[in-house]
Amino acid sequence: MMKIGVYICHCGINIAATVDVEKVTAFARTLPHVAIARNYQYMCSDPGQDLIKNDIKNEKLDRIVVAACSPRMHEVTYRKACRSAGLNPYFFEMANIREQCSWVHPDKEEGTQKAMDLIASAVAKVSLHEPLEENEVGVTPSVLVIGGGIAGIQASLDIAESGFEVFLVEKAPSPGGHLAQIDRTFPDLAETSTTLLPKLKALQAHPQIHLLTQSEVEGVEGFVGNFKVRIRHLPRYVNHEKCTCCKKCEEVCPVRVPNELNMGLDQRPAIYLPFPNAIPHSYTIDSKNCLFFQSGECGKCREICPESAVQFEEIGMEFEAKVGTILVATGYDPFDPKLKPELGYGRYRNVITSLELERLLSSEGPTQGKLLVDGKEPRHIVFIQCVGSRDKTVNNEYCSRVCCMYTAKHAYLVKDRIPDARVTICYIDIRAFGKGYEQFYETVQKKGVFYRKGVPSEIYERNGKLIVKADDELLGEPYEEEADLVVLAVGLTQRQDADHLRSLLKLSLSPDRFYLEAHPKLRPLDTATDGIFLAGTCQGPKDIYDTISQAHGAASRATIPLFSGKVKIEPITAWVDELMCAGCGLCEQICEYRALKIDPYRKVMTVNEALCKGCGACNATCPSSAITLRHFKTEQIMAQLREVC
C-alpha cells in the first residue's frame, strides 16, 4: 500500500503569518494515501530534512510532498534528502505555498484554503509518479572562454592553473577589452597597466591556454561535458613570430582611418599595433581598409618589412574544438549618446564621452595626456551623469553602477592637472557602493569639485560657448551655465552583436537586455543551459573589481564538472511512443535545444536525452500525442487539476 508523507514549512513567518499551518497539516492527514503529515519551522534546515529522512526509514514512506517555497529554491535539496534515505528522488513533489500562496494572499482564511488545494494537488500527482534515474556521461577536460576582456583573461588563467585546457576566443586582434582603453582605476587611481599587463604576459606564456584572436564562435553543438564548438579564425596577414614592431610598415602605409583604441580621436594606418602592450606583440592588417585587399594597388608594408613578416597570402580557417564547459565573458558596449540628441554629442566638438576623456587623459592617448580644447586648456568643465542609464526614454531603466565613481575619478584628475579649472558634476543621485568609494567621493568634493543635483535638459551653443541648461533640484530653480568642455558619463549596455551568441548558446536575456543568470541568489553565475556560465559585464553592469571577482567564481563553477570527470543528465525528458509517431517532424522544428531528430530509416522521432531540457514544447506540439514528458505525464497533470478545479 502506498504511504505518502506531507511536510509543511512555516518558513519563519513567511508562510505561517498568512497560512494556518496547523489547520493545513490536519487537512493533509485526511488525503488519500497520506500516512504522515508534519509541520516545521524551516523544512530546508538540517533538522527539517532529518524529519523526512527518519520518516522514510522508520515509517517506510514511499512518496514525499513538501509544501514550502518555490521548487527553484529547494527542490534539489529535498530530492537529495530522499535519495540519502534510500528513496528514489523523483518520488518527491513540491507544493509552492509561499510565492504562490502566502505572499499573494493577505487574507489568512483565503491563503489557508489555497494552501490546502495546492497540497491536495501535489499529493494527487505524486501518487502517480514513476521512478526515474539520472544518467551519467563523461566530460571533455577543457573549457571555451568567449571574450578576452579582463573577465575572460582572469577566468582563463584560473582554469588553466587548475590544470585544464582553455580555448580563449577574442574577436579583436588582441585581448584586453575596454580595460586597455582605461588609464586609471578608482578609487585608488592606480594605473590599469599594473592590473592588465601581468595578466596578459601570464596569458601568453601559459601552456594550457590557446589564445585565438580575431576569432568568433560560429556554431555550438552538444551538451554539458561534451560541447562541439566551431570557431572561425581570421588572418592577421602579419607573422607574429617574425614581427619586431619596428614601425616601418605603419610609416609607409598611405591609409588613415579612425583609431578604435582612442575612440576615433586620432587616426591609425591600415597596418597597426592594437595597443602598445598588445599580445601577440605584433602588427595586424585591417583588410577592410587596406588598399592591397581593396584594389591590389599597394603593398608598401611588405616591401619595407625587414623581417618579411607581412603575408598577404595568409588565409583564415575554421576548426572544431571539443570542450566540457563554456564561459561567456563578452563584455559591454558604451551607450551611444547620439540617442540623446538634446545633449549635442556629435554636433559640438567639445561635447565628448567619458571614454574619450579617458583617452585624452592617458599618456599614451592622442594628446599624450594633455587636456586641450581647440588647442587650449578648458577652464570650465561640466560632467553630466546617467547618460543612457536610469532613463526610460532610451529604454535603459537600470543603473550602470560605474558612472558615479568614474566621473569622480575624471573630475579629480582634471582638477589635479588644471587646479584653477571650475569643475561641475550634474547628477541624479551619487551611488558610492563599493569599498573606499564613499571616502573617494568625499576626497573629490574636498578637491573643489562642485556637485549640482539635477541632470541637464539641453546643451546648446551661444556666442561660441556651450550653454548647459538644467534645473538645480536642491535650490528648486533653473540655471544656465557656460562650459568649455562637457563630458557625458555614458552608461553600459549589452553588446550590439549579443543576439548572435545568444542564439547559438540558447541564452536568455533579462529585461535590461544583458544575459540572464539561472537564479540571482542560488545560481548567479550559471545560465539556464547546463554547462554554460557568465562572467563580467555581459551579465550586467559592474566595476573592474566585481568583474574580476565574478570571473574567479565563474572559472570555479566551470571546472567543477571537469574535476568530477562526469555529469549527471536530468531524467525529466521527452519520450516518444514509436507506434503512435507519424514522423511529421513538427516537434523537431519547435525544439530549442536540438534534442529531437527523425530517424531517416524508421521515420520516427528520436530524443537525445542529454540535450533534452524537459521544456514540454514538443509534447504540446505533437498532433498525434506521441510524445510524453516524463514526470509530467498527462494523467499526472490531470490528477492535479481535478484537485484544484
Image (tube, helix red, strand yellow):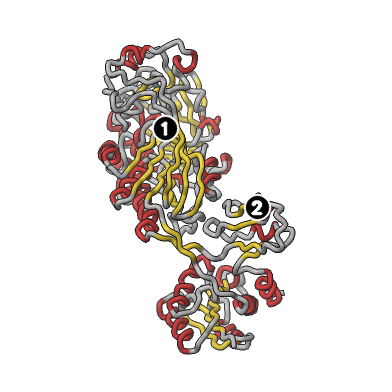
State the CA–CA distance, disc 2 to disc 1.
Answer: 42 Å
| Closer to us: 239 or 430 | 239
Q: Earlier in the sequence, mark 2 or mark 1?
A: 1
Residue 47, position as x, y percentages in the image: 41, 80
Residue 181, position as x, y percentages in the image: 36, 33
State the mark number for residue 67. Answer: none
Dot 2 corresponds to which residue? 601
Quadrant position of residue 560: bottom left
Residue at (70, 63) in percent of width and height? 579
Question: Compared to 521, does 243 lie above or below?
Answer: above
Residue 548, position as x, y percentages in the image: 34, 47
Dot 1 corresponds to which residue? 214
| Amino acid at circle 1 | Gln
Is disc 2 surrounded by few (<14), some (14 to 19) or many (20+) residues within 10 Å?
few
Is disc 1 surrounded by few (<14), some (14 to 19) or many (20+) residues within 10 Å?
some
Residue 70, position as x, y percentages in the image: 54, 68
Residue at (65, 49) in percent of width and height? 589
Left/right placement of residue 202 relative to residue 256 reads left
Quadrant position of residue 531: bottom left
Furthest residue toward right: 623
| Amino acid at circle 2 | Tyr
Secondary structure category for the residue under label 1: loop
